[in-house]
Amino acid sequence: MSITEDVLKNHLVSGELMLGSEVGIKIDQTLTQDATGTTCYLEFESLGLGGVKTELSVSYVDHNTIQVGPENADDHKYLQTMASKYGIYYSRAGNGICHQVHLERFAIPGKTLLGSDSHTSTCGGIGMLAIGTGGLDVAVAMGGGPFYLSYPKIVNVILSGKFENWASPKDAALKILEIFGTKGNVGTILEYGGEGVKTLDVPSRATMTNMGAETGVTTSIFPSDEVTKKFLRAQGREESWRELKGEEDGDERVEIDLGRIEPMAACPHSPGNVKTVEEIEGIKVDQVCIGSCTNSSYADLMKVARILKGRSIDPEMSLVIAPGSRQVLQMLAENGALADLIGAGAKIQEPACGFCIGNSQSPKEDAVSLRTNNRNFEGRSGTKSAKVYLVSPETAAAAAITGEITDPRNLEMEYPNVEIPPRFYVDDSMIIPPSRDPETEIFRGKNIKNLPKGESLPSAMVGNVAIKVGDEITTDHIIPAGQLLRYRSNVGKYSKYVFAPIDETFPERCMENRKRGMNSVIIGGQSYGQGSSREHAALCPMYLGVKCVIAKSIERIHRTNLINFGILPLLFENWTDYDRMEQGDDIEIPGLGEELRGGRILVRDLTKNLDFEVKCEMSERQRNILLAGGLLLYLGATI
Ligand code: MIC
Ligand code: SF4
């Protein structure tokens, strides 16, 4: 059996272990972060589920820590009181990025983890089946409900050899992106194996499973071996270790020789736009940002500190460093590496998502910014004209010194090899255990508004195409984060920004459609909804009256979010129908009852006088959710 099959089998609640069939699995642990958390906990409350029923649930505060105005801090207080009352651990702002902290302090090989963040897959590095999804699915799992997924295709990624100096796990993650691309991988799990695995410590493995999210796979998982045991021991958690090894007999196989990996970069504006650093050397760089849940571990930042020690950054450079956790920052402070970073001219940020989500450190107009994070979608940095390249910490540090994209092999210094310490600095005092006191009063700031209510699906529908977009539209296009993150708890206000980076007039058109008694429809290209797990990319369109998305393909998490909020996800059977449709077309879907069962339904473009079929393959459960008007109504929530 493969590791994936083993873990799925041990957690199976419903369904058959057969490629493509919908299986329900028991969730052992959940995590939320504050930007998706407030909505998730509002949903949890509306479901009236009482306390959490998982083995462990943690609420992290790591995204909205800028706190300009009271909204963020009010949300934190809401999260803290919710956590205390319902049995959830609360990791305070300043304790670090959810994925990094979870890996350090809570992740357990062989267990399942569901998180309201797409990079929950990070804990796959320790051998967890760790899956990112929308907040509503996490709310249900916290209440003890199963999580449903399509039984995955398993791709064995067999690693051999070991990295040459200056090649790193980030470069391997980018190699994976070069091989798999950012689309067409829905319903797949990457399972790592081979002799090369032994050469990678747990944080290195986690960098690779983290960025697996960018390929669109369900998750990625590593075996749990002696290296895993060593990491857990160093975290003072050896008792959580268990061995996990698989048969390496999945549905497909890809072989990678780590010894042949070179320094790589994802060029603007997609993580899939991969080149070798050598190919782009010499481009002038204005900003370097080191951190994020991909590359902010102790070893990552120690390497950077060793490269920068005794040197100064380029005079025109802005260098920003955000450690992944308080553990990392504390260790850098204690061993003096922090002084080396500061001495070289780095701006040290708190351990949080920070620049990665674009809520701070936006570069200047037209800047070239080199970052160690995982996404470089246009405008995500907060500066639309900026060109963001994703690189390893080593390549980032090299550019900070030279002021241009530099292959770190050309630095003419000895490679700063950093081993996992025998003992990490452990202090969990920023993680508050729950009181489970039912009398706890929940704090609700003025910015927390009630969740919008869905509507049940009509048996036939008329609608208007409010927007037609191209391929690879990300959730950052659908509902941007950055400065707008403060409105995550206020759907009415946040909805004014749906599709803002593409077309600011979209919400107005939806409102006009509503006045005409029309539903709104979105037409999408390939890989619609890639990127984040933010359910606001479905919730806000629902609020505006969007009832249906017809696309060439839709990414996994976003598709689930659409269904959870009662929006029909339909796929073009014939892609030429996409070409024929236009924004402004009125459409009719004459049959939405029994027809949904057949896997195909008829769409009529009334403006173009065109009839065509679309695919609507879904499980009976998903169909019932849609008919009910979304998962909350299906589960009888009080909204
Ligand atoms: C991201 O990296 O885009 C985020 C912000 O972490 C999101 C979650 C969110 O939008 O709050 C994610 O990856 O799911
Ligand atoms: Fe935070 Fe960036 Fe990781 Fe998302 S990708 S969880 S914003 S650090």
Image (cartoon, grey):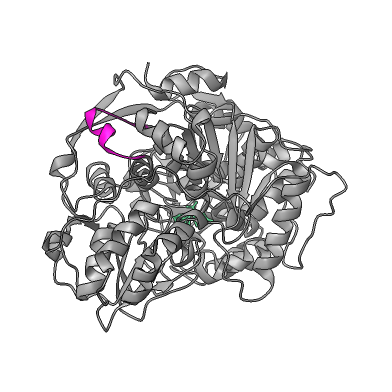
Q: Which residues are magenta?
A: 189-201
- Residue 279 visible in the picture: yes
Q: Position of residue 428 (x, y in %)?
A: 60, 49
Q: Indicate the quadrant where residue 256 lies.
A: top left
Q: Indicate the quadrant where residue 204 lies.
A: top left
Instruction: Give the tally of numbered discs.
Output: 0
- Please name the residue shown 81% across and 55% down the image: 442
Image position of 125 (left or right of 47): left
Point out the residue furthest to the bottom here: 315
**Closer-to-camera residue (499/72):** 72
Residue 625 against residue 447 in the figure, above or below: above
- State which quarter of the image contains the N terminus: top left
Q: Position of residue 585 (x, y in %)?
A: 48, 58
Q: Indicate the quadrant where residue 488 lies.
A: bottom right
Is 518 magenta? The answer is: no
Image position of 320 (left or right of 445): left
Residue 151 against residue 219 in the figure, above or below: above
- Residue 519 visible in the picture: no
Q: Position of residue 86 (x, y in %)?
A: 76, 43
Q: Position of residue 183 (x, y in %)?
A: 33, 45
Point out the residue furthest to the right here: 439
Image position of 165 (left or right of 80): left
Image position of 138 (left or right of 105): right
Is 196 magenta? The answer is: yes
